[in-house]
Image: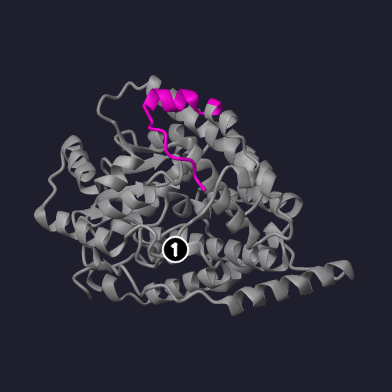
Amino acid sequence: MSDMALKQGGQGVLPSGETPSEGPLAVKGVRAINRIGGALRRWGVPLVKLEPGRLIEIACASDGLTDFGGYPLEEPLDALVQALESEASLSLVGRLTARWEILHLLRNRLRLQRDWTAQPGITREPVKRPIFILGLPRSGTTLLHALLAQDPASRYPAHWEVMHPSPPPDAAGIASDPRIRLAQRELGWFYRMAPGFRAMHLMGARYPQECTEITSPTFLSLRFDSLYSVPSYRDWVDEVGLEPAYAFHRRMLQHLQWRCPPRRWVLKAPDHVFGMDGLLAIYPDARIIMTHRDPLRVTPSVASLTVALQGLFSDAVDVPRVARTVAGRWADGARRMVSLRSADRAPGRYLDVHYQDLVREPMAVIWDLYAKLGLALTSDAARRMEEFLAQHPQGRHGRHSYSLAQFGLDAAEQRREYQDYVDFFRVAEEAPAG
């Protein structure tokens, strides 16, 4: 293991060489499969069916397990599948992917419940004062999460642990767990399907994972809204709330730390801004770091990322509609942040990080955060953070280019939508994207 590796109590995150090269042949293969699917549809041949009851039966038969635990299942799964069928315009690859993903999550859920029943000590694990990073997407949440994760005193959920969580990871074998290679192969296929995605978002088997992936086995997770066009599902989630998903999230943290300390969690997901009531109900002692960036740089970047993701699985991505949806959604998210902080009754709970400060002087931001959080930043942790920054310069995997104009969005209108947010958090204006 390289000294440059990102450490997590014996687990390492390699800064380079972990992701297989992107494959244009794989992209051509995906397009060919989708053309076949289109032809079959025109000929009246039924494609892959998404039937919740049948998918549950298949998942249960896989390992002979039937107990999904007490967290939501049938209703959210039905809501998701209905939206996939009626709104997502799934391609053949999209249908195959959705079916595989739902079965994978159901099997994970069954295996996790088996673990929790067999090892009741997991449910007694303390989860104290977790640190959550949230804010507008593309505002530095991933970079900040990765930096805080360098500290050996911190615990973070790695991609491989979330993708294949059962059995609970063990500190003695965490650096060589075979699930790491399995997860990396699966991520490798994703990169082959999506050339250029590495320039948009940092992923790898050992890298920190987002909380929306942790909650996905409940099917109460906004990560599905990023991958597929499912507006009715998103609206349904907003209506029912995310508290049950956060209860499952807490159980997952207990599961991951049971045999693999440390226990000082650093977590992140921009979408937490839409679930703060549920988050704080489950984690009343949580500490919240909000990241901020000029929304006129955020909106086209998120639109570009969403179009790229949904284009992998859909036959018909309406780019202007996606952009309008993204713009409206995150304008609402910004208003929620202002409302939350305006009503703040917990002094010291919230901290702010501005994107421009983070990219200009990342270590100064880190030192300031540690002081305000009352944590000790050791020389070893600081050295690991500096090494990570040296190994991950901006643009290492190419530039992610985007602009408001390419999505048909008006800059003046967008500025008005976000003005309260910009004023409240004193967000600096950046040069236009393009």
Above or below for 204 versus 350: below
Question: Is 387 on the left or on the right of 232, as rendered?
Answer: left
216 falls in the magenta region = no
Residue 150 visible to the viewer: yes
Could you say which is closer to the camera, residue 342 or residue 84? 342
Furthest-right residue in this view: 43
Q: Is residue 160 left or right of residue 323?
A: left
Q: Which residue is mark 1?
A: 398
Looking at the image, residue 62 sits to the left or right of residue 39; the answer is: left
Residue 422: where, in percent of width, then height?
Answer: 43, 27
Q: Residue at x 69, y 59 (%)?
A: 314
Rendered position, 159 above or below 320: below
Figure quadrant of the N terminus: bottom left
Q: Identify which residue is drawn at 50% across, 62% down.
A: 197
- Judging depth in this view, the residue of 41 and 386 nearest the camera is 386
What is the x, y in percent for residue 418?
50, 28
Residue 184, relative to residue 394: is it above or below? below
- In terms of image quadrants, where is residue 35? bottom right
Q: Residue at x 55, y 61 (%)?
A: 106
Numbered disc 1: secondary structure: loop
User: In front here: 40 or 46?
Assistant: 40
Question: Where residue 108 appears, x then y in whole percent?
Answer: 49, 63
The mark total stands at 1
Residue 279 position, x and y percent, is 41, 37
- Hey, what amino acid is under mark 1? Gly
State the extent of the magenta-drawn residues as a range.
416-434
Q: Is residue 242 above or below residue 389?
A: above
Q: Residues within 10 Å of mark 1 (few under 14, many from 20)?
A: few
User: At 38% across and 47% down in the image, what residue appears?
Assistant: 141
Q: Is residue 202 left or right of residue 311?
A: left
